[in-house]
Image: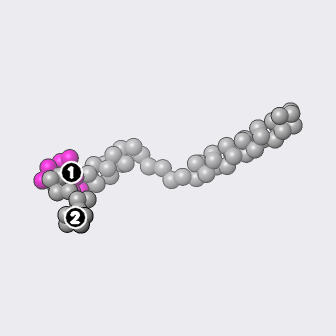
Amino acid sequence: MDGETMNMHAVAGLRKEIEDLSREVKLERMLTSEAAKDLMKFCEQHATEDYFLNPSIALENHFKEKKNCAIA
């Protein structure tokens, strides 16, 4: 590549980086402590559906075929 082509690629890369940073600066953020509380609340609400916390659910295989397959 010649110098001009390399400069065009560099400019394009910098423009993309500016677009990405502009998008990121507009994101709504929350405090880590609030996010942690929300995550704990979600985990507690869904604990009964968790295969790791409720072994009886793990015994059921929802992907197992219901019927046996026989080739005749």
Q: Which mark is residue 51?
A: 1
Please state the horizontal and vertical placement of residue 47, each as a whole percent of the image.
20, 53
Q: Which residue is mark 2?
A: 70
Please state the horizontal and vertical placement of residue 44, each as a whole percent of the image.
22, 52
Q: Which residues are magenta?
A: 45-56
Residue depicted at 63% across the width and 45% down the height: 21
Q: Which mark is residue 28?
A: none
**Residue 5 visible within the image:** yes
Q: Residues within 10 Å of mark 2 (few under 14, many from 20)?
A: few
Please state the horizontal and vertical placement of residue 50, each as a whole percent of the image.
22, 52
Instruction: Check the image and name the residue furthest to the left.
Output: 56
Please state the horizontal and vertical placement of residue 58, each as a whole percent of the image.
18, 52
Residue depicted at 75% across the width and 44% down the height: 12
Q: For this rendering, which residue is in front, 9 or 41?
A: 9
Point out the image quarter for the C terminus: bottom left
Task: Report the amino acid beneath label 1.
Answer: Tyr
Residue depicted at 67% across the width and 43% down the height: 17
Residue 35 falls within the magenta-colored stretch: no
- Is 31 on the left or on the right of 24, as rendered? left
- Is 30 on the left or on the right of 21, as rendered? left
Circles 2 and 1 in contact, beta carbons < 8 Å: no
**Label 2 secondary element:** loop
